[in-house]
Image (cartoon, rainbow, N blue to C red):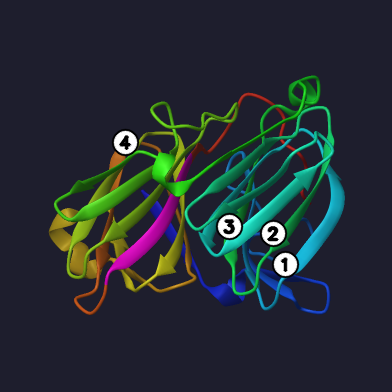
Amino acid sequence: MDIRIYTRDEQAKGHFGDGEIVENKPIGFPREGSVVTRVGPLFYWAWAKSMKTFEIPLHPHSGFEILSYVLDGTVGHRDTLGNVQRVTTGGVQIMQTGSGAHHAEELSQDSELFQIWFEPHLATAVKRPPTYNQYDHEEFPAEVVDGVKVKRIIGPDTLIQLVTDSLMNDITIPAGHSYSVSLPAGYAHAVVVVEGNGLVGSNPDHLTEAQSMKTGDFVVASAEVEGNTIYQATEAAPLRIVLIQVPTDVDYPLYRKS
C-alpha cells in the first residue's frame, strides 16, 4: 500500500472577491499549483472559508457531479433550475450538472465548506438533464463503533449515490483511539484532516512507524491488493477526517488537467 501526505503548502490556494472567501485546495484546477492534480475520478477538492457574508455569482457547470459539504455555518444556493435553498452545518448540496446549469452560492460570515467535484463519463453525463438536491445533517445515517463516529454521506445505503464510483464518510475518532478502514484493490482513499492530529499507516502491529498528519493535511492511500488504512488520534484530542474512496483508474477517458 502506498500512503502519501500533502501539507497545506503543497496544496493550491484560491479566493473570491477581495478575499471575502479564501480556499485551500487539496486538488486544484489546472495550473493552480496543487501537487495532487486528481485522484482517479476525484477531480477537485476545495476547503472554503468565508471572512464575511459573500455570494459567488451565477456561473455555469456541465457534466460534473458537484458536492458541497457544509462544515460550519450556512450556505445558500440558487440556480437556473429554479431552486433557492439554504443548508446549514453538516448538510449537503449536490448538483449533477448534466447538460448544464448556472448556480450561485452564498456563504454566511465564518462559514466553511468542502466543494468536491466527481467526474463521471463526461460525454455521457452531458446528455442527462441537470439535477439539484440537498440534505440536512440529521438525514444522513451515522453509527458509533468503539467510540468512533462514522457519518455516511455517499454510498449504497445513504441518501446520495453518484454516477461516479465513490464513497464518502465523515469520521471522528476519540483521543487515543484508532480506526481501520478497508481499502479494496484498485482503489484509493483521499482524506482531508478536518481537525486534530494523528497517525496513518497500514500495519496495525507497527502503527508507531506510521506517518504523522495534522489539521489541513491531505492523505492519499492507494492499494494494488486489498488492505486496510489505519487512522489514530493523538492522546491530546479527537481526530476528524473526511474520507472519499474512488477507483484509481476508470474505463472511460478523464478530462485532461495538464
Instruction: Give the magenta-colored segment's residue range.
Output: 238-245
Question: Distance between the Cα atoms at labels 3 and 4?
Answer: 28 Å
Gap in angstroms between the C-alphas marked 4 and 2: 28 Å
Foreground disc of the pair 1, 2: 2
* SS assignment at label 2: loop
> How far apart are the two marked residues, 2 and 3, measured between alpha carbons?
13 Å
Rendered residue at 26%/75% (across/down): 237
Q: Residue 70: give x, y in percent of width and height.
A: 55, 57
On the question of residue 223 being in view, the answer is no
Residue drawn at (36%, 46%), measured in percent from left and top? 151
Asked if one can make out residue 66 in the rendered structure from this viewpoint, the answer is yes
Q: Is label 4 in a helix, a strand or a loop? A: loop
Residue 219 horizontal side relative to residue 28, left or right: left
State whether residue 142 is above or below residue 51. above
Mark drawn on residue 226: 4
- Residue identifier under label 1: 33
Q: Residue at x 40, y 45 (%)?
A: 138
Q: Which mark is residue 28?
A: 2
Q: Earlier in the sequence, mark 4 or mark 1?
A: 1
Q: Which residue does the numbered mark 3 point to in the structure image? A: 114
Magenta highlight: main SS = strand
Q: Which mark is residue 89?
A: none
From what the image shows, is residue 172 above or below residue 185? below
Pointers 3 and 1 in contact (CB under 8 A)? no
- Mark 1 neighbour class, 10 Å CA radius: few under 14, some 14 to 19, many 20 or more: some
- Counting residues from the start of the chain, the first of labels 1 and 2 encountered is 2
When the figure is inspected, residue 133 is found, relative to residue 220, above or below; the finding is above
For the residues labelled 1 and 2, the Cα–Cα distance comes to: 7 Å
Q: Nearer the viewer, mark 4 or mark 2?
A: 2
